Amino acid sequence: MRRFCLAVLALIAVVVPLAVPRGVSAQQNDDLYDKAKVEGHLTIYAGGPTAPWEAAAARFKTRYPGIEVAVTGGFSNVLDTSINKQLHDGKMDVDIAFLQTVADFVDWKRAGVLLPFRPDAFALIDNGFKDADAAYVGVEVNVMPYAYNATLVKPEDVPKSALDFLKSEWRGKLVAAYPADDDATLYVFDSIVKKYGWSYMDRYMANQPKFIQGHLPEQRSVSSGATPVTLDSIVSITLGEQADGKPIRSAFSAIDPIPIWALTGAIFQGSPHPNAAKLFLNYFLSPDEQSRLGTWSVRSDVPPPAGLKPLSAYHVVNSYRDFLSDRAAIAALRKRYEQYTGPVVNTGGVR
């Protein structure tokens, strides 16, 4: 698995943006706004929790009045099915999509159904998080450390590596999303199995973990104490739970690589409101919006959330796009993990 080059990340963290006249992007956005107001509408499909996207859409509408925004949230592997049907039927409802299923964007680019657009922030985004031809671009970096309930787990018992989740003390107290259903969780388990072998899964399953569809209910299970530890949390959800006063905390392993991936966005050829979509992508990648994410920005000039370090300070692995792009291998992996967990039986939520 290809690892993030920490030396390159360190360089990116301090790089000075190229000097661009301030009026250039402002003029581009003014032009886009004039055209977007004529379109008058924008339809966004967003994978993951819906509420943050609705909040961003509300801020966008305040900044650019006259453009109504509709947000459809849900599981990425459900939204992409709807998009594929629209593409097949030749009638697009969605203008822009932000999904976890990055391999979809690779396929859509190959099929020529994406509208290339180079947002203002494009030069500040690491190559690992964007398409070289600007067909799609990452909009936020998701980091997947462990998570635990701080009222139930003593500091000395916080897991430090994947092997710690095999201890008998965690029997019946583990939770994870379904790896056969969730791409990000599949990526997490794959990084573990690549290091420790498939026998790891046999030992993990012997500890009687609980599986939930989606990371939001998974991490709420940790917050509530129903299942006090997980090995595949998403930091932005953890921080959101913390902001609500919940006792969930992240634990970053220095032993095992921490999987990271970019939530990816793209505009579709034939979308009803392409200029509004371009304007929103510029807006969402602006420094102000990127600083609101509650996770790491894809921009090199936006610092991490308070209390967290730059990505270069962590032991990470960033091969999510390559991992998911081998469709045949991924299909085989899903089947193998489903043999461990069984099919999805408890549908979670993404609100």
Image (tube, helix red, strand yellow):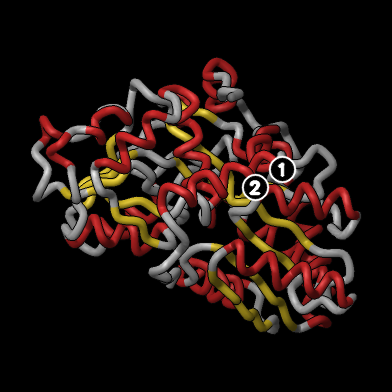
Q: Going by the image, does 282 lie left or right of 295? A: right
Rendered image: mark on residue 328: 1
Residue located at (56% from left, 23% from top): 3
Q: Taking the image as drawn, is residue 348 in sight?
A: no
260 versus 278 height, above or below:
above
**Circle 1: element type:** helix
| Residue picked out by circle 2 | 331
Q: Position of residue 121 (x, y in %)?
A: 69, 45
Q: Position of residue 227 (x, y in %)?
A: 21, 54
Q: Position of residue 24 (x, y in %)?
A: 79, 50
Instruction: Categorize mark 2 by other alpha carbons within 10 Å: few (<14), some (14-19), many (20+).
Output: few
Q: Are marks 1 and 2 in contact (CB under 8 Å)?
A: yes
Q: Position of residue 316 (x, y in %)?
A: 47, 28
Residue type, label 1:
Ala
Q: Going by the image, does 136 lie left or right of 141? A: right
| Quadrant into which the C terminus falls | bottom left
| Quadrant into which the N terminus falls | top right
Instruction: Categorize mark 1 by other alpha carbons within 10 Å: few (<14), some (14-19), many (20+).
Output: few
**Circle 2: element type:** helix
Rendered image: mark on residue 196: none
Residue located at (60% from left, 38% from top): 320
Q: Nearer the viewer, residue 127 or 344?
A: 344
